[in-house]
Image (spheres, rainbow, N blue to C red):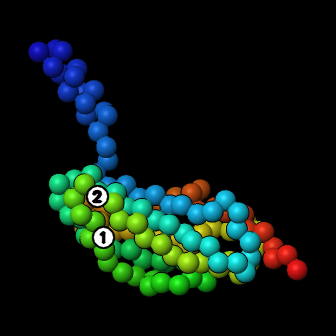
Amino acid sequence: AVAAAVAAAASAAATVPPLTVSLACPADITMGHPFTLGLTCRNATPLPQPLTLQVTDANGFVFAGARSFSVTVASWAAADLRYQLVAISSGELLLPELVITAPRFGALLRPPRESRQVYVRPHAA
């Protein structure tokens, strides 16, 4: 019985979170040049997960795409979303703030500031 309890505890510790969100952007960003900001939402549950995404702050950037939209991530799948951005300032900037609402979990997901920090090089003349 103790071995089963230990095995169950080890299994629970190794479980995958039901919903994960990750950001991806190029390491090299230059002011005035377009680049892609990628967002991947992974659903590790047997149910489709409806999500609402909002861009709430895009200071220093212009971008193409809706500021707010909904997507449903299929069970055991991922949804890849892309924004085209152009930095209009140089220096240390924060990528646009994204707020993801997952109503089935009653959760609000916000990538942390640290994951949104980038350095934008000035435009070379």
- Alpha-carbon neighbours of circle 1 within 10 Å: few (<14), some, or many (≥20)? some
Q: Residue at x 17, y 54 (%)?
A: 46
Residue 95 got which mark?
none
Q: Quadrant of residue 12?
A: top left
Q: Residue at x 32, y 77 (%)?
A: 70
Distance in Å between CA atoms under marks 1 and 2: 13 Å
Circle 1: residue type? Leu
- Which quadrant is home to the C terminus? bottom right
Percent x, y of residue 98: 47, 70
For discs 1 and 2, the disc positioned in front in the rendered view: 2
Q: Left or right? Give the position of 48 relative to 14.
A: left
Q: Left or right? Give the position of 50 relative to 62.
A: left
- Secondary element at tag 1: strand
Percent x, y of residue 117: 64, 61
Name the residue tied to disc 1: 51
Q: Nearer the viewer, residue 64 or 60?
A: 64
- Secondary element at tag 2: strand
Q: Work out whether residue 42 can be spotted.
A: yes
Of all residues, the one furthest to the left in this rendering is 1
Position of 124 relative to 111 (above/below): below
Q: Quadrant of residue 19?
A: bottom left
Q: Residue at x 35, y 65 (%)?
A: 79
Percent x, y of residue 24: 54, 61
The answer to whether marks 1 and 2 mark residues whose Cβ atoms lie closer than 8 Å is: no
Name the residue tied to disc 2: 77
Q: Work out whether residue 61 can be spotted.
A: no
Q: Residue at x 28, y 58 (%)?
A: 77
Q: Left or right? Give the position of 53 relative to 103.
A: right
Position of 4 relative to 86 (above/below): above
Of all residues, the one furthest to the top in this rendering is 2
Position of 49 relative to 55 (above/below): above
Circle 2: residue type? Ala
